[in-house]
Amino acid sequence: MNVSQIILISNYLPDKQESMRKYALNLRQGLSSQRIPVKLWNPPVFFAKGWKSTTTGIGKWLGYLDKWVLFPAILRLRLLRAEYRKKTVFFHICDHSNAPYLASLPPSRTGITCHDVLAIRGALGYQDAYCTASKTGVILQKWILKNLLTANRLASVSQFTMNQLYALSTSANHQLDKKWKVVHNSFNAPFAPMQRLKCIPHLDRCGIPSDKPYVLHVGSALPRKNRQMVVNMINAVGNQWKGLICFAGQPIDAALAGHIKNLGLSDRVISVVKPDHQTLVALYSACEAFIFPSLSEGFGWPLIEAQACGAPVVASDIEPMPEISNGTALHADPLDKKAFAEAFLQVLQPSVRARLIQQGFENCKRFDNDLLIKEFIDLYKE
């Protein structure tokens, strides 16, 4: 089957879901490079126009009107146009959280990317998702799952996420008449080692002395990111290493700050809030090791970002982290500080460090954007 055009359905911009925005833009760029005509559609901002936040309070409910009432109506109206009724025009929903849009689009010509099922599983009571949900959140996630399972074409960013999605299906044979496949994420921005001299100005602005080693964690303050383990790991290492801890992403919350203080590590912890891309690359490139003790992920972008910048990685041994590293990182129990400390001490050995860095570069080749686009296009070919 020929593909004459793909319409990408992206996220509601006021929600500021940066990673999903980058994913959609990356797909658009990659498809365009293959000379496939592509358009990007976002839900309109109408009811929530002028509101500072669409994730809390009244703004959230006004945003819901835009996303779940207005946009589906717009989709149906657009599909009345002859140009979108062609059998070679396909639609792809870039975020599984927007699965309800499947009901407004032609089933045989529509697909969706499933990035994770963490919020869905959390709403269903799975404790290992480390994602709690409110009463309305439970309703929303069940609605998302119900629609997601109807998708005829689905790209899962990891085999682990695909397996979890299969487990949530009420039909053991649901996948037999559908085209569901694993399509690993690619890099959604350029990541490569930055020379040490070029890193120094960025480190200075972050408050990291150029002669001081540090370990790095990148991510949010969500409980599933398990930031506390990084601190516990360094505390367990004791006098065997006296470098710094850098948390990049969201600010350190009160609970973590209190824990750091109780361990007497306040003078060794640095917080870099929402670093720009070049600063992030510098942080990855110059760190002693990247520490990723996450308790649940759908893919785990920071792991490969760190490897692409030449950082050795110590990550959780919970899937999908081993799947994404493919044996090129050290893995340990994210609830065992001694295991993480022992893994980190291995990284300090020159031979181990050199091996992890080189293997990390090789691993990153699996996530080349050309491979993603090839697999993505195959999703829409019979």
Image (spheres, rainbow, N blue to C red):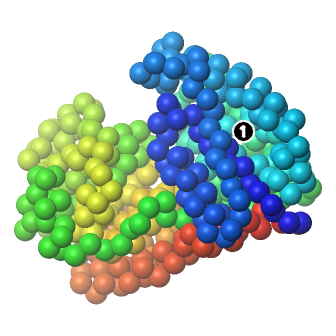
Residue 21 in sight: yes
Task: Tell me what residue is drawn at x 71 percent, y 59 percent.
Answer: 37
Picture quadrant of residue 319: bottom right
Picture quadrant of residue 105: top right
* 229 on left or right of 235: right
Q: Residue furthest top?
A: 58
Could you say which is closer to the camera, residue 336 or residue 297? 297
Tell me the element at label 1.
Answer: helix
Q: Residues within 10 Å of mark 1 (few under 14, many from 20)?
A: many
Q: Which residue is mark 1?
A: 99
Q: How many marks?
A: 1
Task: Tell me what residue is drawn at x 76 percent, y 41 percent.
Answer: 148
* 352 on left or right of 12: left
Q: Amino acid at mark 1?
A: Ala
Could you say which is closer to the camera, residue 99 or residue 381? 381
Task: Tell me what residue is drawn at x 34 percent, y 53 percent.
Answer: 218
Residue 344 x %, y %: 28, 68
Residue 327 in sight: no
Residue 337 x %, y %: 32, 55
Task: Tell me what residue is drawn at x 79 percent, y 39 percent.
Answer: 102
Residue 8 x %, y %: 68, 49
Quarter of the figure with the N terminus: bottom right
Query: In this picture, is 47 found above or below 159?
Result: above
Query: In this picture, is 325 found above or below 100?
Result: below
Q: Residue furthest bottom?
A: 351
Quarter of the figure with the C terminus: bottom right
Query: In this picture, is 270 found above or below 73?
Result: below
Could you say which is closer to the camera, residue 33 or residue 157? 33
* 72 on left or right of 350: right
Could you say which is closer to the camera, residue 204 or residue 40? 40
